[in-house]
Image (tube, rainbow, N blue to C red):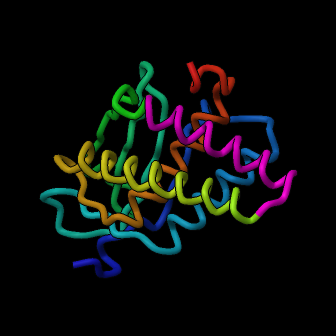
Amino acid sequence: MASAEYRLCDVSLDRSFAGRDARIEREQALAVIDLLESNTFIPVGHDGGPYRLTIAAADGRLALHVADAHGEHVVSHYLSLTPFRRLLKDYTRICESYYDAIRHPGPERLEAIDMGRRGVHNEAAELLKSRLSAKVNIDNDTARRLFTLIYALLVRNADRRVLLS
């Protein structure tokens, strides 16, 4: 079922996600590359793609607009971030701990932080799969990559204190 027809061939971001932090820009670019490299993306009730995904901000939510390879609209889904709030806070704290740990080497500490990061990442991916399931079916790896991109976009647009409050 995960043939070349059921995949994303393009991911674009609304201009509202413009940022100035080079590190976040790099994380976002890597998230898009990883997502396009390998994904399973199946809009419910649609015959096949590949698909183009545009992510935009809309009234405090993420708008996910899906079109076919020719640009014909397939489906839109508006994703509330409220169910992700705790996971985004946890993920932000873990990422900050990881960056701190890199400055103070110790393999045990990095391993523990990485295990925690993977756990939160997996939980967020499952929630994302569930929240999208009425409109789009995705596999675990695609959900993980999409969450990474969403996280990078949100961090890029917000003072980290917003994610932590």
Query: Can you tell which quarter of the image residue 143 is in?
Result: bottom left
Q: What percent of the width, then of the height, locates residue 32?
A: 58, 59
Q: Which residue shows up at 61% across the image and 44% down it? A: 94
Image height check: is 134 above or below 79?
below
Left or right of residue 146, residue 33 in this image: right
Image height check: is 82 above or below 41?
above
Query: Can you tell which quarter of the image residue 1 is in?
Result: bottom left
Q: What percent of the width, then of the height, locates residue 165?
A: 56, 18
Q: What percent of the width, then of the height, locates residue 34?
A: 56, 67
Q: Does 101 appear in magenta?
A: yes
Q: Main secondary structure of the magenta part?
A: helix
**Which residues are the magenta region?**
86-106
Q: Which residue shows up at 31% across the image and 69% down it? A: 49
Left or right of residue 101, residue 160 in this image: left
Left or right of residue 45, residue 123 in this image: right
Q: Does 97 appear in magenta?
A: yes
